[in-house]
């Protein structure tokens, strides 16, 4: 069973993280969840759930963000992917400068040092120049920067459709088969 680490940080967009966890659970991935203090605030505000309830509902392992001795902090723990969703600008900045002062940033840096899949899902808007530069550096170092920017060509009818659009892109990066939304075929606009 593939394993992933998912961190929910302080940017608005906790729904993306929740939907990602649901999708990983449906795909039978074993997932370790990290929620920062600010991520927990947004999780409660935006989704009406605590990190503990989320972990229990989806049967995922909740790791304490203050525990730098947790499994996901070690390179010898072979996780297939690390996803920070949503990724706050502060978290992105810390990762880009090598600061591992909590489990969310430490796990991301472990992914980088071990050359494993790391996906950051920034949600803040607009981006500040320091955050843009940090994302450019991270991208050059092999990190996937996947902004929570849903498309509209699939005619979304609900917020869930918009969330699924972004989560589908994450699942594509992980080579997970899914049915979240329609794929572009080229027939949508007819021949020109």
Image (cartoon, helix red, strand yellow):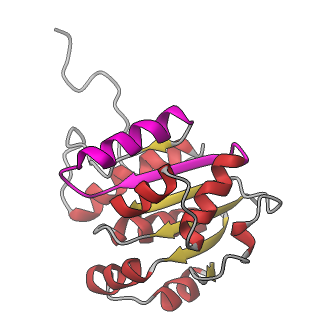
Q: Is residue 178 visible?
A: no
Q: How many marks?
A: 0
Residue 157: x and y in percent read 18, 57
Q: Residue furthest top?
A: 192
Residue 109: quarter of image: bottom right
Q: Is residue 76 visible?
A: yes
Residue 140 in the magenta stretch? The answer is yes
Against 43, residue 113 (above or below) is above
Residue 186: x and y in percent read 30, 21
Q: Quadrant of the N terminus?
A: bottom right
Residue drawn where x is 49% and y is 91% of the image: 53
Against 40, residue 9 (above or below) is above
Residue drawn where x is 20% and y is 54% of the image: 125
Image check: 129 left or right of 90?
Answer: left
Q: Residue furthest right?
A: 76
Residue drawn where x is 73% and y is 77% of the image: 69
Residue 154: x and y in percent read 24, 42
Image check: 80 left or right of 121?
Answer: right
Q: Nearer the viewer, residue 48 or 91?
A: 91
Q: Quadrant of the C terminus?
A: top left
Q: Nearer the viewer, residue 175 or 148?
A: 148
Which span is picked out in magenta?
Answer: 114-141
Residue 40: x and y in percent read 40, 83
Residue 39 in the magenta stretch? The answer is no
């Amino acid at each position: 069973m593939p394993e992933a680490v998912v961190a929910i940080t302080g940017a608005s967009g906790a729904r993306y993280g929740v939907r990602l966890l649901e999708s990983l659970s449906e795909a039978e991935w074993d997932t370790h969840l990290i929620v920062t203090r600010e991520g927990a605030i947004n999780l409660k505000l935006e989704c009406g759930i605590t990190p503990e309830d989320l972990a229990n509902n989806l049967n995922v392992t909740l790791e304490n963000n203050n525990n730098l001795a947790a499994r996901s902090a070690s390179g010898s723990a072979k996780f297939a992917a690390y996803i920070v969703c949503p990724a706050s600008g502060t978290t992105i900045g810390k990762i880009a400068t090598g600061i591992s002062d909590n489990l969310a940033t430490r796990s991301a840096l472990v992914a980088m040092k071990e050359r494993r899949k790391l996906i950051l899902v920034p949600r803040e808007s607009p981006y500040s120049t320091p955050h843009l530069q940090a994302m450019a550096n991270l991208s050059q170092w092999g990190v996937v920067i996947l902004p929570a920017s849903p498309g509209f060509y699939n005619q979304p009818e609900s917020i869930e459709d918009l969330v699924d659009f972004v989560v589908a892109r994450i699942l594509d990066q992980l080579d997970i088969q899914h049915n979240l939304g329609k794929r572009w075929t080229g027939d949508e606009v007819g021949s020109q």
